[in-house]
Amino acid sequence: MTLESFITNWLGQDLPIRIEAFDGTEVGARDAKTTVKVNSPDALIRMAWAPGELGIVRAYVAGDISIEGDIYGLLELRSRIPEVKLTLGQIAELVRIVGVRNLRRIPPPPEEHRPSGRPHTRRRDAASISHHYDISNEFYRLILGPSFTYSCAVFADPSDTLEEAQENKYELISRKLDLKPGMRLLDVGSGWGGMVMHAAQHHGVKAVGVTISQPQVELARHRVAAAELTDRVEIRFQDYRDIDDGPFDAISSIGMFEHVGMQKLEQYFAKVTDLLVPGGRLLNHAVSRSSSARPSPLPKPSFSSRYVFPDGQLHEVGSVITALQDGGLEVRHMENLREHYALTLRRWVSNLEANWDAAVAEVGEGRARVWRLYMAASAVLFSDRQAHVDQVLAVKTFESGNSQFALRPHWERAQR
């Protein structure tokens, strides 16, 4: 069997992309918007040893495969091969094409990360967070823009700039929390300080942001000082489990919840509940899986778990609401921002591609490839309703049952 026949038997005829291989094989229209180049037989060897998503990703990250043109064109193949998995017969065909004598195991690219130790201990969580966030503040600036905001934006209109949409998101959360001057706000997983800075500047709160990424702490403190907010904003290098100076009037958690882990939900919500004053509000903003996706106790080996978010887990929003209420909070509002995240991710991909050479100079081509693929694939998942991003608003009720939450304006009424 030739490589050309293997490709057409696997992916079908009339491909929406063009494939060019090291042996001269050419499949697909010359004017396709996406060209995949198989640069080395090592790509096929990786696929034979890991006959699914992981093998293809390893080949791409290592440079054995390259993607030219529109990366979203490649992702259209998901409708043809939704699980990207080779059969035993297809693996045997690959072996024949490569040659048995050449079939040696190739080490994964250095960008692949395998956490060690018991999941969601402080040590392992710190290592997983470091793998994703501690690579380069400048790299993130190239992708995220000057807001340094690494979570779903909220677009009043698709023509909004990314900066405008991120400000919209911070203001939406501020209104849901009903922030007022003099309140004390905790932002769990505060990143580069965007939420706490917005809340202090526009709503007069005293804000504390915590993160376990040291590069984020350093840059966030610099940004706070440059904005002359050091009297109102404190940035800490601190695990949320170690916060002991509550209570807070309001707590925001934006894009951090995915790192908590299924086994730690009860502990997480118990902690944030304990840190809130009676009547205080929590806004939990997190990516969630669709209700049809089956949860697993631990992430399976995949592109995301090995290259992007080690130990990251997505929860179905209904189970999150249940866990919140079991933890002593009362849920008052839920909003799905799925379409907004699809648009946000596409803006980030555009930024990365526009700044490709600078990004590669910062973190290397392998890691830049990881981020390009992960953000583009995530945009498609949100567009296809296979993932959501939900904001859940909850309140800590009074022990007497005489909830005073209703005496404070609900966030929707507060906008008028």
Image (cartoon, rainbow, N blue to C red):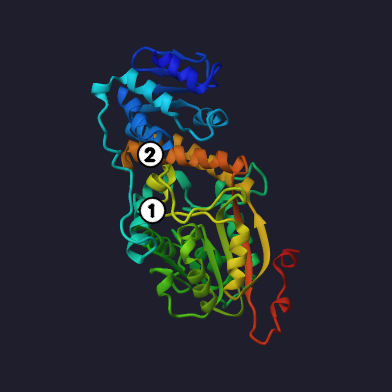
Tell me the residue at 38%/20% (across/down). Answer: 93
User: For residue 128, which quarter of the picture?
Assistant: bottom left
Is any atom of residue 91 visible in this view?
A: yes
Tell me the residue at 44%/51% (across/down). Answer: 299
Query: Viewed as shown, does residue 413 lie left or right of 380?
Result: right
Observer-nearest residue: 204 or 348?
348
Label 2 amino acid? Answer: Ala
- Image coordinates of residue 404 in percent, x first then y, are 70, 81
Up-down relation of residue 32 to residue 277 (above or below): above
* Sooner in the amino-acid sequence: mark 1 or mark 2: 1
Tell me the residue at 28%/19% (across/down). Answer: 99
Q: Farthest residue toward the bottom?
A: 400
Marks 1 and 2 sit apart, C-alpha to C-alpha, by 13 Å
Observer-nearest residue: 390 or 164?
390
Is any atom of residue 214 visible in this view?
A: no
Q: Farthest residue toward the front?
A: 88
Q: What element carries label 1?
A: helix
Residue 368: numbered disc? 2
- Image coordinates of residue 381 in percent, x first then y, are 56, 41
Label 1 amino acid? Answer: Tyr
Residue 396: numbered disc? none
Observer-nearest residue: 297 or 360?
297
Question: Residue at label 1?
Answer: 133
Query: Viewed as shown, does residue 377 lie left or right of 357?
Result: right
- Image coordinates of residue 180 in percent, x first then y, are 62, 74
